[in-house]
Image (tube, rainbow, N blue to C red):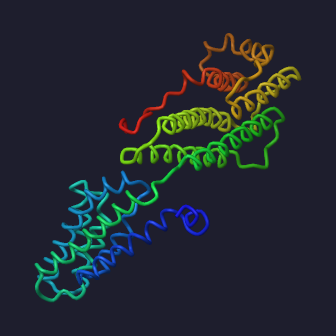
Amino acid sequence: MQWLKRRFIGGRILKTGVAVFLTALICQLFNLPVVFAVITAIVTIEPTAADSIKKGIIRFPASAIGASIAMLATFLLGDTAITYTISAVLTIWICYKLKLDAGMLVATLTAVAMIPGTEDHFLLEFVKRLGTTGIGILTSTLVNFLLMPPKYKDQIISLISDSQAKLTQLLAERMNELLDQKNSPMNLESASNQLRTQLDRADMFCRFQLQEWHYHSYKREEMNEIQTLQKKIYLLRQLSFHLANLISLPSDDAPEWSVEEKQAVRTLISQLNNRIIRTGEQEPMDADALALLRHELKGETDEEELPDKSYIYFELLTIHALLKKRRSFVKVPSARPEEL
């Protein structure tokens, strides 16, 4: 199974295929309509078992609402265009009012799919087709729960590594722009937005993994690894905010720099980037460079607005503080599956 997952198709595709096969097989064994169940099985596969169970509880009553509306509209109006419209619109509206958002899509599909071919025996058709929808929901939930529980650690590590590389590259590029008063060929603002999106994705995978452990066993070491990775993500996210502040400064109004200032800033950028990439023992930061930045900031706190140079120094010193005290600065909201 693992070989098939690596070599041929992804886990979610394989789960969808298995869910569709089992759903169709069950429906055929009991001589029930297959289409409704299969459509439901396809759209209800979720990234985690936790999501499948939570949303499955919502989707079934939502589907019952959609089926009821469709049967009533068909009984009153027949198989007409207005029947489809009323069924879809009313199903969406009622699901929204009842806060059944997770079941809205399945309920709407169930409603419009029930209309064709329903000419009489409306109650029997309602029970039969709602039952097939329930089979689809239940089958996809069980497949998601039992088959190949997802492991997101490798994806998280890859995203973190790529984010670290992008962050250091963008920080170096932006400071070169400001020091040399030249525009970079890169679109730094767009790249910074992509970096934050990537970090959000990594954090989402951490939450998926913790949610998955609600329903599957895990080792304490595995949970500690995910917690450590989550802390790295939160640190990188905070650093990305300060990078965005530097990027937002107008490039055409960059301050003048002395040779000593340029050298100090370039030294600090190199050392900060090393600290972003490496988490172990680090060489001490250049004390003279730090002293120069702190000296420039003295006396600026009484001003209504910091000069651009002092603002840059403030952001660099804040990045330094985050990296120096990463443990006390970075607080992850949830470290255990049961706390989610």
User: Is 144 displayed left or right of 120 in the figure?
Assistant: right
Which image quadrant for residue 294?
A: top right
Which image quadrant for residue 121?
A: bottom left
Above or below: residue 286 compared with residue 33: above
Residue at 41% across, 48% down:
212
235 or 152: which is nearer to us? Answer: 152
**Quadrant housing the C terminus:** top left
Above or below: residue 336 compared with residue 211: above
Above or below: residue 76 compared with residue 176: below
Above or below: residue 305 compared with residue 73: above
Residue at 65% across, 49% down:
190
Residue at 71% across, 49% down:
187
19 or 126: which is nearer to us? Answer: 19
Task: Please state the horizontal and vertical placement of residue 169, each as a whole percent of the image.
Answer: 74, 41
User: Is 301 displayed left or right of 134 in the figure?
Assistant: right
- Count up the numbered dots: 0
116 or 125: which is nearer to us? Answer: 125
Task: Please state the horizontal and vertical placement of residue 45, each as a whole percent of the image.
Answer: 39, 63
User: Is 235 displayed left or right of 128 in the figure?
Assistant: right
Task: Please state the horizontal and vertical placement of residue 293, each as a whole percent of the image.
Answer: 74, 17
Furthest-right residue in this view: 259
Which image quadrant for residue 175?
A: top right
Task: Please state the horizontal and vertical placement of residue 69, each as a whole percent of the image.
Answer: 17, 72
